[in-house]
Image (cartoon, rainbow, N blue to C red):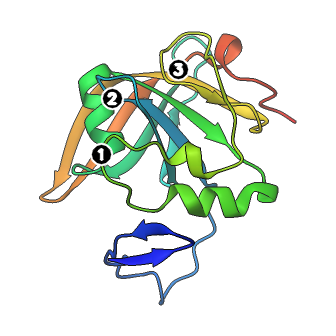
């Protein structure tokens, strides 16, 4: 554990491909709330739309089962996918830190929480696009990784999706 600008930073292992492959992906920030109502925000790039029918859109999000995001989604069934611009790269990086449970990453960023339309977790005002979602299924793919399938209704829940 080390300090960065007075904040504790917990060391973590990088993914095996981090220094081998360059894979461009959309980076999203998923916001959730725990049972006490504390907001969690974390960046995720394994966000894959897989059923694009207008009456039943679905996405898959890959995450580790020990993350606060995963635990909150399992507990509440709700999350928001926020699509930040490159102007907020420093804020996205700040949300990638491993803060202890019960501490909101958003308090260390320039992001502003706003009420979501259909779910309890907040949306981020600075993100041009957001999608409210409910978990429908959790799939265990390999021993230490999880994937999460979620339903959202883009027509009523996404802001400025095509901007």
> How far is the residue under mark 3 from the one under mark 1?
27 Å
Residue 5 in picture, x, y percent from top left:
57, 72
Density class for disc 2 (Cα within 10 Å; few <14, some 14-19, many ≥20) is some
Query: Residue 152: which disc?
Result: 3
Front: mark 3 or 1: 1
Nearest the camera: 95 or 46?
A: 95
Q: Residue at x 57, y 44 (%)?
A: 107
Q: In the picture, which quadrant includes the C terminus?
A: top right
Which residue occupies 68% across, 42% down? Answer: 83
Kindly identify the residue that appears in the image at 28 percent across and 23 percent down. 35
Q: 163 or 57, which lies in front?
A: 163
Residue at the extreme bottom = 20
Q: CA distance from mark 1 to mark 2?
A: 9 Å
Q: Position of residue 26 (x, y in %)?
A: 64, 55
Determine which residue is flagged by label 1: 101
Give the residue number, with chain letter if any, for mark 2: 34
In the foreground, 40 or 25: 40
């Amino acid at each position: 554990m080390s300090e960065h600008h007075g904040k504790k930073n917990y060391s973590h292992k990088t993914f095996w491909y981090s220094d081998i492959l360059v894979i461009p992906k959309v980076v999203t920030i998923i916001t959730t709330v725990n049972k006490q109502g504390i907001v969690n925000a974390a960046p995720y790039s394994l966000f894959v739309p897989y059923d694009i029918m207008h009456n039943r859109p679905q996405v898959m999000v890959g995450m580790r089962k020990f993350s606060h995001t995963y635990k909150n989604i399992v507990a509440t069934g709700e999350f928001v996918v926020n699509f930040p611009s490159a102007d907020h790269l420093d804020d996205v990086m700040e949300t990638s830190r491993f803060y202890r449970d019960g501490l909101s990453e958003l308090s260390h960023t320039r992001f502003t929480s706003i009420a979501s339309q259909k779910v309890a977790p907040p949306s981020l005002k600075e993100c041009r696009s957001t999608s409210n979602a409910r978990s429908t299924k959790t799939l265990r793919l390999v021993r230490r990784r999880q994937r999460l399938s979620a339903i959202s209704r883009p027509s009523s829940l996404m802001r400025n999706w095509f901007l």
